[in-house]
């Protein structure tokens, strides 16, 4: 069943429709992503949230055409600026990748090649889409991009190797590499993982600044709800390979209509509440994608199944449909008027943990002239 789309009058740059990704293994078929649909417009940011194994990164790797098609079954549709990506040849996908669509990977130390300088790797990406350009021009472009992302002394640091950069600087170099061909869609997979809070704030501010300058669409994949609250115009929550909630960023984070989303929010410390108040982690573990639970995949961990008649939670998969707060807020839950139930029984979800009037992410101001050891 195809998930509902977020309504919009503006043409989407990226449109994913009923995307399903399967990995056949000796133990069975891993149902990594099932029936996923969403749209992203230029200048907008979509945050994809969920625990490890929920299908966040798998779906974005499909957009980039980075799955091994001999070992992966992909169905559905992925359109980038109207061009179908599913089934596209590797040569045509290579032209699209890095040019129209680019990805910032989770760990820049492993994504960057240790045997080549930062500058050489940026130059290679630039020349791949500008075959007639000279090496001198490409190097000048690499220096320009390093300066653009705040690398100090870019004329010198362009010849450094990845291990000579700190964590924050490597992430900046990855962003420079991703943006060197002016892509219109940037997929950022956990871009602030393993960075301290000050550098994290700088990286998020840098992404937002570059988005304003380039007019790019951004898909940010994260488990950090603070990052989502800071950046995302829309939030898509994934669980067990499916979208379970989708809506405006502030709306989803302050008035969740799916118990799983509410559970994620209850795990976030409330900085303005009682410091003695204990967090409420979600019990249990994420489902196996080799044999997902019947019905709603969240039902073994959900504390609200007793409010749904007829054991529907364990028998029927809930459709992704409009919740109680209008057609733009979609939820996958059998619970009637779930938003009100969650707000009444768990008032922390109603806006105290994620106050829409205050930035929920890091608030440290970036240093306008980064020091050479930034991110150490």
Image: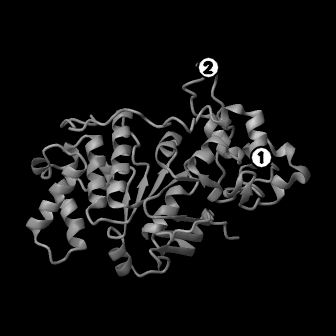
Does residue 239 show up?
Answer: no
The location of residue 95, given as percent across then percent down, is 33, 76
Where residue 376 sits, quadrant-wise, is top left
Where residue 17 sits, quadrant-wise, is bottom right
Q: Residue at x 48, y 37 (%)?
A: 359
Q: Residue furthest top?
A: 276
Compared to 12, does 227 lie above or below? above
In this view, the residue in front, 292 or 19, is 19
The numbered dot on residue 235 is none
The location of residue 164, given as percent across then percent down, is 19, 43
* Residue on which disc 1 sits: 338
Does residue 99 show up?
Answer: yes
Q: Describe residue 261's horizontal placement relative to residue 197 as left or right.
A: right
Total label count? 2
* Residue on which disc 2 sits: 274
Where residue 213 sits, quadrant-wise, is bottom left
The location of residue 161, given as percent across then percent down, is 18, 50
């Amino acid at each position: 069943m195809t998930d509902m789309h977020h309504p919009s009058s503006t043409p989407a740059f990226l449109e994913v429709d009923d995307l399903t990704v399967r990995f056949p293994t000796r133990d069975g078929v891993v149902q990594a992503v099932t029936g996923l649909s969403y749209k992203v417009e230029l200048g907008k940011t979509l945050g994809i949230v969920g625990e490890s194994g929920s299908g966040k990164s798998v779906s974005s790797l499909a957009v980039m055409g980075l799955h091994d098609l001999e070992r992966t079954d992909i169905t559905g549709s992925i359109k980038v600026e109207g061009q179908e990506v599913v089934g596209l040849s590797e040569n045509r996908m290579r032209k699209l990748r890095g040019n129209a669509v680019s990805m910032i990977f989770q760990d820049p130390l492993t994504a960057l090649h240790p045997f080549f300088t930062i500058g050489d790797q940026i130059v290679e990406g630039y020349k791949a889409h500008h075959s007639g350009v000279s090496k001198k021009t490409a190097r000048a472009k690499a220096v320009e991009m390093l300066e653009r992302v705040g690398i100090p002394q870019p004329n010198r640091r362009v010849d450094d190797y990845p291990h000579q950069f700190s964590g924050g600087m490597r992430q900046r170099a990855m962003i420079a590499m991703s943006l060197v061909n002016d892509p219109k869609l940037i997929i950022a997979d956990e871009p602030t993982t393993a960075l301290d809070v000050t550098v994290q704030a700088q990286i998020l501010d840098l992404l937002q600044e570059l988005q304003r300058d380039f007019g790019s669409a951004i898909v940010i994949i994260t488990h950090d709800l603070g990052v989502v609250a800071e950046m995302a115009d829309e939030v898509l929550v994934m669980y067990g390979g499916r979208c379970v909630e989708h809506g405006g960023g502030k709306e989803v984070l302050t008035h969740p209509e799916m118990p799983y989303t509410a559970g994620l929010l209850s795990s976030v410390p409330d900085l303005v509440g009682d410091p003695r108040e204990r967090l409420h982690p979600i019990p249990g573990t994420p489902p196996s994608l080799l044999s997902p639970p019947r019905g709603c995949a969240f039902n073994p961990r959900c504390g609200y199944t007793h409010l749904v008649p007829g054991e529907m939670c364990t028998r029927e998969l809930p459709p992704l449909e409009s919740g109680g707060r209008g057609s733009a807020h979609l939820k996958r839950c059998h619970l009637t008027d779930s938003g009100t139930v969650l707000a009444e029984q768990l008032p922390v979800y109603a806006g105290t943990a994620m106050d829409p009037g205050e930035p929920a992410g890091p608030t440290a101001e970036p240093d306008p002239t980064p020091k050479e050891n930034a991110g150490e």
